[in-house]
Image (cartoon, coloured by chain):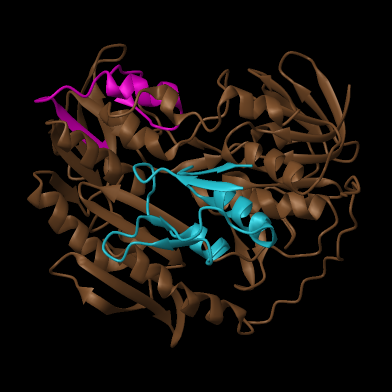
Chain colours: A cyan, B brown
Amino acid sequence: MKVVVDEEKCVAAGQCVNAAMDVFDQRDEDGIVVVLDEHPPAELADDVRNAAAICPALAIRIEE
Amino acid sequence: MTARVLVVGASASGLSTVEALRRKGYAGGITVLGDEPHAPYDRPPLSKQVLSGAWEPERAALRAEEQLTSLDAEFLLGETAVALDAEKRTVRTASGREVTADAVVIATGVRARRFPGAPDLTGVHVLRSLEDALALRGELVAGRRLVVVGEGVLGSEIAATARTLGLEVTLAGPLAAPMALQVGPVVSGVLAGLHTERGVTLRLGEGVVGLTGEEGGRVSGVRLASDEVLPADVVVVAIGAVPATEWLADSGLALDNGVVCDAWCRAAEGVYAVGDVARWHHEGLGRSVRLENRTNATEQAMAVAGVILGEDRPYAPVPYFWTDQYDAKLQVHGFLPADAEVDVVEGDLAARRFVARYRVGGRVTGVLGWNMPKQTRLRRQEVVDALQEPAVPTPTTVPVPTPVITPAPTH
């Protein structure tokens, strides 16, 4: 699994961090998404898929 | 025809329901009815990027065609549901089609409220659909006078977008400041300062009683309660939305400003509601709520997909919404009641970079951030903790639902 984010689409909601905090964070200055782990381990796959689904700006894409 | 799951509504919450069912391993049949002819698209950009012209409309599509295809669901677009028999779980459409399902998910959203009793005038707009956005966009020409009726989130966003495009913008509505109902007096005061500084004329605190113009002709202005007329070349009416439940009038479902559901978002056996149209019992709050925001459309859909597949988890989210106006990005987690006590806990109001905490009776109900998204999200936990404390006890008399559909075994 590979996580790809679109910083331009990101609205800094932080919902992805709530869903998968080992994989996503936000920049301190403007809240834009930061990917901590581009290739998350299998045990986090469901959380990461949920994070992509919950993103209100459709800014997270997952390549399985 | 028979579908195992029928989703009525093909916007964010309807699509999210389908996706969540598939993610959770459901492999059975799914049919989706959508009254609009378009493939599912996203609404938040309509008042911002699509309205300003920064995005072509295609960019608001929720999914690419191949992603929709991969869901293996039958999308019937341009098919308006006109009736539901909740007992039989049969939906009839305007074209006469009947679809019966084991589970029916109502995701028909809301409709823009129109100005009551207004004459038929050109130049008067509402903003809910893609067509609405494109029609309005065509009229947003620099130098024109735009009056936005309604000082809520949508009205405030439209005012900001139009002002940025160079129109002469007036924002009118009965409350004292933009978004006063949504964010309370302190933050709406800061918003009023921002709009004024950017050149929007605020005519707030006075009701709008009518539109002026010759019947069949073009709008010429907006009449206030004082009888003063605000001259206008274009008018946007953004005075809220009403749940699209007319088609459910004879369904046997309880309707009360939305489809009334229990804590599992169940309106009747095998019938659920999600998104803007759903009013459900929020156990953390101990009362029913209906949320019109983008995040709820997805979260509630995920919850309902789980319930359909037998998960026993009441839906009790910490709501989230955001709004972008000029360079201001506001983020809200939780609830901001009008009578809440508001403290700035980080940053400061004058710098327009802060986090405000809302409390009622000492209990945190929500946090609002202005250009401090991460810091705001970090304080969301306070809202989560407060929601988990026992609320005013309101016993639910609703039994735990039984699954109507068993997911295919995953391997």
Q: Which residues are magenta?
A: B119-148
- Residue B345 picture location, percent across and down: 29, 80
Q: Residue at x 81, y 42 (%)?
A: B252
Quadrant (top left/top right/bottom left/bottom right) for the N terminus of chain B: top right
Confirm whether the magenta stretch covers residue B139.
Answer: yes
- Residue B146 picture location, percent across and down: 19, 31
Q: On the picture, is B54 further left or further right than B245?
A: left
| Residue B283 in which image quadrant | bottom right
Q: Do we see residue B257 in this rendering?
A: no
Q: Residue at x 43, y 88 (%)?
A: B362
- Residue B207 picture location, percent across and down: 27, 47
Q: Residue furthest bottom?
A: B362
Above or below: residue B124 compared with residue A12 = above
| Residue B99 in which image quadrant | top right
Q: Considering depth in this image, is A19 or B388 the residue closer to the camera?
A: A19
Confirm whether the magenta stretch covers residue B341.
Answer: no
Q: Considering depth in this image, is B339 or B324 the residue closer to the camera?
A: B324
